Amino acid sequence: MNAAVESKSKKRWTLEHPELGTDPLPVAPYLSQKYFEGMREKVFKKVWLCTGKRVEDIPSPGDFFVFDLEIAGAQIIVVRGLDGKIRAHHNVCMHRGNKLTVHNRGTFKGKMVCSYHAWAWSLDGKLANVTEEEMFYNLNKKCLNLASVACDVWAGFVFVNLDPEPKETLLEHLGGIVEQLAGYPFHELPVTWSYKAHINTAWQNARDSQLEGYHLKYLHKRTSPGVMSYAADPNRHSLDYKLIGRHSMGSYFGVRAEANLAPVARLATKYSQTLGSAASALSDPNTWPIGVNPTRSKDWFFDVVYIFPNFHFIFLGNQAYIGHTFLPCTVNKTYWNARCYMPAPKTLVGQFARECAKTAVRDLWMEDGSTLEGTQKVLESGVLKYLQIQDQEIQIRHGSKVMDEMVGEWQ
Ligand SMILES: [Fe+2]
C-alpha cells in the first residue's frame, strides 16, 4: 500500500466535524408522522427546492411544467412568460379552486384558461378575464391574480420556494456550492433519459440511498463489476468530502479501467460516456469546476453533490451527470425522478453506446431501488431502533443532522 493510499485509509472525516457526533441515528424520525409534518412546515414549505427541471425544459413563452409537491399538498405551475421570464404559480383557479391544468407539462397559448368556467390569467399570473363578470357581486379583481410562488434559476435549474416571504435568496441557500460548480457546462447537455417512480418508503430512506459510496462494491457488483476492487487500494475509501452549509459533497473512488464489463459494454465505453468510460474521455479534467473530481485523482469514479433538501447531483465527468429528485409524498411514500444528461450522439455507433449506458444505469438504479421498500417494512416492524452509520456515510449523518435541526422538537 503506498503512502497516499495508507493515509486515505486512516482518514476519519467524521472526527474532523465533532458537531456531527458519532452515535447511531435513531430510526424514529424515519417513521414519525409528527416528524414528517415538521419537515413539511419547517423545511419543504420554507426553503428553496430544486424542481429537477431545467430552463431548457420550457424553452418558449407559454411552455410550462407542473412541480407536484405532495407533502405540501401543492401543485406548482412553472411557466415561461411572454417576456421570457420563468415564474411559478399555484395550480389553482381563483374562481372556485379547479385545477388550472391537469397536464404535467405543455404550452399555454398566451393565457392560462381554466377549463371549468374559462376564467383566464396572463402568464405572469395577472387576472385577464372573468366570464359573465356582470353576474358576480363585489368582485375584487385585485385579489384574484394567481397565487404566485417564489421562483429562481441557478445554472439553468429551476427552483421554487413556497414561503410567501422567503427568508433567503436562492444564492444564499446554495452558498458555497455555487463556487464549487461554477463553469460546469450544464447548458450544453440535454436530458438523455429519465426514469420516475413512486416508492413505498420513507423519504429519508430514498435520500440516504444516494448519499454514500459504501454500498457500491457490494450492491452494484453486477452493474459496476471490478470498478471498486482495485488491488492497490483495498479499502477503496472516498477521495474527498466537503460539508458546505446544509449541503455536502462526496468524491468517490473507483478505477473505471478495471471494470470487468461484458464485451458489448466495453465497446460502448469508447463511443459514449458510460459508467465504464474513462472520466477524461470527453474533456480535459484540468478544465473542470473545482468541485468536480476536486482532488483531480485518476482513480475517480464520480461525485455526489447533495443540494439540501431534495436534489442529488451525480457527476460522471465534465460532460455527463445525473440529477436525482427525491420528494416526500406521505410518511411512507416517496417520489423519485432520475435524469441523466450527456451530449447527444452524433453517429449511429454513438447512439448504440448511449443505449448501452442507459440500460446499465437503469439496472444500477434498479439495484438502488430494490432495497427501499423492504427496508421500510423492516423499520416499521420495530426490530431496529438505530441505524449504524460509518465514516464513509458522513453525508447521511450530516444531512440527517441538518434536517433534525430544522425540524426541531417533534416528539
Ligand atoms: Fe447505488
Image (cartoon, grey):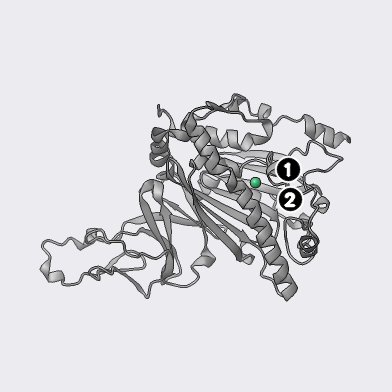
The image shows residue 302, relative to residue 406, as above or below, that is below
The image shows residue 344, relative to residue 321, as above or below, that is below
Question: In the drawing, does residue 97 fall left or right of residue 250?
Answer: left
Depth check: 276 or 141 in front?
A: 276
The image shows residue 182, relative to residue 8, as above or below, that is below
Evaluate whether residue 406 shows in this view. no
Are circles 2 and 1 on residues that touch, CB within 8 Å? Answer: yes
Residue 30: x %, y % from top left: 48, 35
Mark 2 neighbour density, 10 Å: few (under 14) some (14–19) many (20 or more): many
Instruction: Give the CA distance from mark 2 to mark 1.
Output: 8 Å
Depth check: 324 or 251 in front?
A: 324
Query: Which numbered circle lies on residue 152?
Result: none
Residue 242: x %, y % from top left: 66, 39
What SS does tag 2 mark? loop
Q: Residue tagged by mark 2?
A: 224
Question: In the drawing, does residue 159 fall left or right of residue 217?
Answer: left
Q: Residue at x 12, y 61 (%)?
A: 138
Residue 388, quarter of picture = top right
Residue 271, quarter of picture = bottom right
Residue 282: x %, y % from top left: 76, 63
Q: Is mark 1 within 8 Å of ligand 1?
A: no
Quadrant showing the N terminus: top right
Evaluate whether residue 249 shows in this view. yes
What SS does tag 1 mark? helix
Q: Residue at x 72, y 49 (%)?
A: 222
Q: Residue tagged by mark 1?
A: 217
Q: Name the residue type under label 1.
A: Lys
Q: Name the residue type under label 2.
A: Ser
Quadrant showing the C terminus: top left
Question: In the drawing, does residue 105 fall left or right of residue 353?
Answer: left
Q: Residue at x 72, y 40 (%)?
A: 240
